[in-house]
Amino acid sequence: MRLRATLGALSLRLDGNETAAEVAAAVVAAPEMPLEVEVAAEVAGEVVEAALAAARERGLQVSLRPPRGERKVFHTELVHRTLRSGQRVSSAGTVVVLGDVNPGAEVVAGGDVVVVGALRGLAHAGAEGNEQATIWALELAAKQLRIAEVVAIAPEGSESGGGPERARVENGQIFIEPWGRKR
């Protein structure tokens, strides 16, 4: 069991090693603040009931929190080559390509896509729904970009802006802007 004060509440974490009497005594002795209860392991029903009963007797507001899972720490995948037609790179994190992404090649990332070269193939950043993801390229000449569920298709005959650019989602649309220089 761990009982600690957070910014707006007391946080009670039940780990399965506590008794009903220990939990009730801890809640009774705690400062008068809202109580957040997290059941982090297999805990006997009477232990949870004891915590809730002690909080109810004191008139404390109680909320239940889902157990904290493992935090996913995504890595950056570094690709040290040009991607040719038919090649695909996929990662849950950010993908950095040190070379070009040619037509017919695909880069799919849960995070950002960074191309240190020309992006002429398909890039899909934020593939798991992250609209904050961005696509960066030294030459952005892709026919299609995807960020989360938002798709942008380049008009026929369009050309790159002539330098490094960044694509991001703004108001539900993909917006392309210069990167690293003023226009």
Image (cartoon, helix red, strand yellow):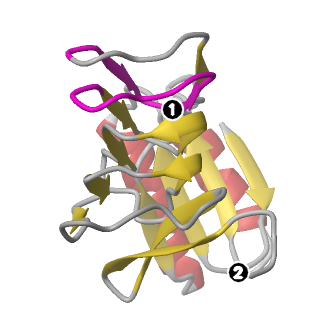
Q: Main secondary structure of the magenta part?
A: loop
* Pick the front one: 182 or 74: 182
The label shown at residue 47 is none
x then y, percent, for residue 11: 66, 59
Q: Is residue 19 above or below residue 12?
A: above
Residue 123 lies in quadrant: top left
Residue corresponding to mark 2: 33
Horizontally, residue 169 falls left or right of residue 75, namely left
Query: Is 97 included in the stretch rendered in magenta?
Result: yes
* The magenta segment: 86-105
Query: Residue reaching furthest front?
Result: 157
Q: Amino acid at mark 2?
A: Met
Query: Is 99 included in the stretch rendered in magenta?
Result: yes
Residue corresponding to mark 1: 93
| SS for dot 1 | loop
Question: Residue shown at 40%/31% (left/top)?
Answer: 43
Horizontally, residue 172 falls left or right of residue 69, namely left
Q: Amino acid at mark 1?
A: Gly
Disc on the earlier residue, 1 or 2: 2
x then y, percent, for residue 136: 58, 51
From where the camera sits, is residue 123 visible?
yes
x then y, percent, for residue 90: 35, 23
Marks 1 & 2, CB-CB < 8 Å contact: no
Q: Is residue 62 above or below residue 131?
A: below
